[in-house]
Image: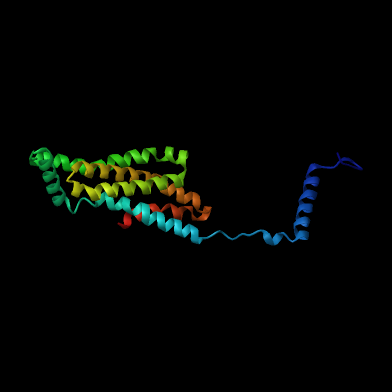
Amino acid sequence: IMYNSSGLVPARFLILISHFAICVTLLWNGKESDISTEKPGWTKLLALSGVSISLGLCMPVGYNIGVVNTPAAIIKVFCNESVYTRYESVLDQTHLDLLWSVVVSIFLVGAAIGSLGGSVLADKIGRKGVLCVCAGLYILAAIFLFACKAANSIEMLIIGRLVVGLASGLTTSVAPMYLTELAPLNLKGATGVLCPLGLTIE
């Protein structure tokens, strides 16, 4: 405890002296120049991460949402031929529409499962680990979708759509999380929109 002629030294005076001592020490040691007020910007690694995730993982989501619309008539013919060849049954219009609706909507079933489980999986294996799983699921789905015509299998088409939906759901829930955690505070908004941007490009 410090004393002066009138008794205890006031606490405010001690705080003022300590602040003055800190400022003098910083100026004396030349550390004032080490303090930077510049905001961090885009680095090459951050830009590469943003572009690769946006084009490599998010763009296939938008592609697979609408890819079945244009060749719908061709895929329906394939579905009918596949069922006739494998099961010796001809589908009427009602059953063909039902099968077609399964092919289209199974993507959304997989996407719902992936988006709901994305946060849990991200906590267990990490954001980067989930994105690697997404890339593997995209490759697996591409194999199923590419081989379904040669195998004459409508089941492979449905499984491929389910798997790519699962990968899409995981991507849309984890990719923005990963990008915003990579970015500095002033760029979190910019990196957060890269996933929707990649989705809408296609």
On the image, which quarter does residue 122 sit in? top left
- For image coordinates 72% across by 59% down, the residue present is 31
**Relative to residue 168, is residue 45 drawn left or right?**
right
Quarter that holds the N terminus: top right
**Relative to residue 52, is residue 141 drawn left or right?**
left
Task: Report the number of discs.
Answer: 0
Residue 144: percent from left, percent from top: 26, 46
Residue 103: percent from left, percent from top: 21, 43
Q: Nearer the viewer, residue 12 or 29?
A: 29
Q: Nearer the viewer, residue 118 or 83?
A: 83
Residue 200: percent from left, percent from top: 32, 55
Q: Nearer the viewer, residue 196 or 100?
A: 100
Q: Residue furthest front?
A: 151
Q: Residue furthest right?
A: 5
Q: Nearer the viewer, residue 40 or 92?
A: 92
- For image coordinates 80% across by 45% down, the residue present is 14
Residue 49: percent from left, percent from top: 45, 56
User: Is the image coloured rainbow, by chain, by secondary structure, or in one colour?
Assistant: rainbow
- For image coordinates 66% across by 58% down, the residue present is 35
On the image, which quarter does residue 10 sit in? top right
**Relative to residue 101, is residue 30 drawn left or right?**
right
Quarter that holds the C terminus: bottom left
